[in-house]
Amino acid sequence: MSRIQLLSPRLANQIAAGEVVERPASVVKELLENSLDAGATQIEIDVEQGGMKLIRLRDNGGGIEEQDLPLALSRHATSKILVLEDLEAVNSLGFRGEALASISSVSRLTLTSRRSDAPSAWQVQTEGRDMEPVVSPAAHPQGTCVEVRDLFFNTPARRKFMRTEQTEFKHLEEVVKRLALSRSDVSFVLRHNGRVIHQLRPARTEQDHERRISSVCGPAFIDQALSLDMCAEASGLRLWGWMGLPTFSRSQTDLQYFFVNGRIIRDKLVAHAVRQAYQDVLFHGRHPAFVLYLELDPRLVDVNVHPTKHEVRFREGRLVHDFIFRTLHRVIADVRPEAAVSSAAASLDGGQAADPAPGIPGINAQQFEQGRMPLAQAPLGGSAAAGSSSGSGFQSDYSPAATSLGAVRDQINGYGALHVSANGAGGLGGPGANSAQDAALAAAQAQGEVAPPLGYALAHLHGIYILAQNEQGLVLVDMHAAHERIVYERMKQAYETEVVRSQPLLVPLSMAVSQNEADCAEEQAAVFQRLGFELSRMGEESLVVRQVPVSLARGNIEQLIRDVLSDMLTYGQSQRIENHINELLGTMACHGAVRANRQLSVPEMNGLLRDMEITERSGQCNHGRPTWTQLSLNELDKLFMRGR
């Protein structure tokens, strides 16, 4: 082995470039961050051949002093931090002082800049081979222009790893999109081979911000997104932005943008919290879409983790995880048909939608009775079946907060026995049911009253779908999926109000674990006990399980505990036990829900609609399938070309 030698500046910069400059998109990211840190409000990017031939970025930022231009191309030269305390509370996007030096070492770079108080602009040029900067006067308005030509011209091996021009430009465009979302107050123009790809105006109002998001993420996202109010704050954390409805899911994670203090990140803790929030409303294998902004004290997050600055480390990871999860979970839970119908009405009326009322007082016809479905009613038969024909047998004072799992099982049995009399006035074949329904709705509208969000049932289609009429048009409901969600949510409420029953193991289960896992189990003993487990530590690297929840007694207890401990060590908490319990409850709800081809009377269908309106997450079943959809009168008219 040869003797230790000091690397030349050129070689050191090219080594650093391997970390910072991966492809043209990396160059654009570093240059854009510098422009934003300089206070730019207008940025233009010109690209040729996907960025391999030319990247030119102009801004109207503060500019660079003449004497600082050569220094700007040196390693570890920056104006953003001076002392260690600055590094512990970084407010800027860039701070390492490596980007320009790394870029100039693998390209032909020209940097032109002028400060507002300078009489003229100055220019510095370098080429990757000699790294000798040449400074000369130039003509340029206030701001900075960085021109990067022939990227990787002196590192052929790296150039061979580049993809096609279109692929490289797609990566570069994605970087511009991310930073355009992080700073909606800045205008961006992106051109490729002389053609304008994006021209984004600055956003000054909430509507402008939504327009920016629509331009970047597509109009479909903003049309099907939930807005988080600016008031989601706790413990010095603030979360706001937009999250897609569960029905607007993706096959890939290509529409997920999460910003921490304006910096785009991809963090496993954040991803886990979001995934947990969407857990039982997304179809299997699908991914949510979101644009979210987290703001917190810079001292509580470490951005000096990776050269690309895509990863961060939170000092209070468990607090951040819990805050994100609970905020998103509550927003999803609060989605009701009322909100969706009101939103649709607003878009049709130009924002003049009326506030839906819980029901229409004054409609006393038995077939339109709006009582909730008899979840606590025993299996129907005999006189109960006779009562179904008139609608009076389906009144219930049931409260959503069930008291026990036994009561919930009775509710399921009651649903399972629902049927309809073939000749009843309230049944599907009842004479004049639909015309009476129309008359009732028309009378309510004439009196200025508003129908419930999901309207009133009209008919049953093939024993699968409920057809209902509201003020906006036609509502289609998947009967089984909707009922499955109702029963599932009530079973969860019942389980949460009960003390979890535990079952002692005849032979205690011994587990060999790591010392960290044993320490975690000892610290979280109260959490395990609340969930029905009794764990005790028998040594430095051993645990003994003495009791387990009755509902999980037949499962793989050892693997479950190992997974829980792994989650707690990684994310600060775990939902695995609750998820296993919810999975069992979901299976029970699925088997207990009203099955297809079971005919319901109009009062029963109306009862199901009313229950949907008060149930959390009623827009999706336990498996993530949608439970209902709205067809407006305009959409129906288009199907039949009315008004043309």
Image (tube, rainbow, N blue to C red):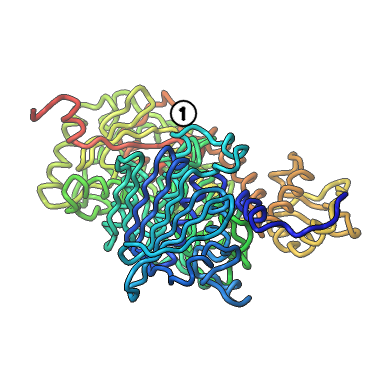
In the image: residue 14, left or right of residue 200: right
Nearer the observer, 209 or 161: 161
The C terminus appears in which quarter of the rendering?
top left
Identity of the residue drawn at 37% across and 40% down:
608
Nearer the observer, 41 or 276: 41
Identity of the residue drawn at 43% across and 70% down:
66
Examine the image and state in which quarter residue 113 appears.
bottom left
Q: Residue furthest right?
A: 539
Vertical arrangement, residue 581 with respect to residue 428, above or below? below
Vertical arrangement, residue 339 with respect to residue 469, above or below? below
Examine the image and state in which quarter residue 85 appears.
bottom right
Visible in this render: residue 404? no
In the image: residue 271, left or right of residue 337: right
- Few, some or many residues within 10 Å of mark 1 (<14, 14–19, 20+): some
Nearer the observer, 205 or 351: 205
- Image position, residue 588 (x, y; %): 57, 37
Q: Secondary structure at mark 1?
A: loop
In the image: residue 557, left or right of residue 27: right
Examine the image and state in which quarter residue 424 appears.
top left
Number of labels in the image equals: 1
Query: Of the residues shown, which amino acid type is indicated by label 1?
Result: Arg
- Image position, residue 295 (x, y; %): 48, 66
- Image position, residue 305 (x, y; %): 63, 60
In the image: residue 236, left or right of residue 368: right
Q: Which residue is mark 1?
A: 595
Visible in this render: residue 594? yes
- Image position, residue 351 (x, y; %): 19, 53
Nearer the observer, 62 or 181: 62
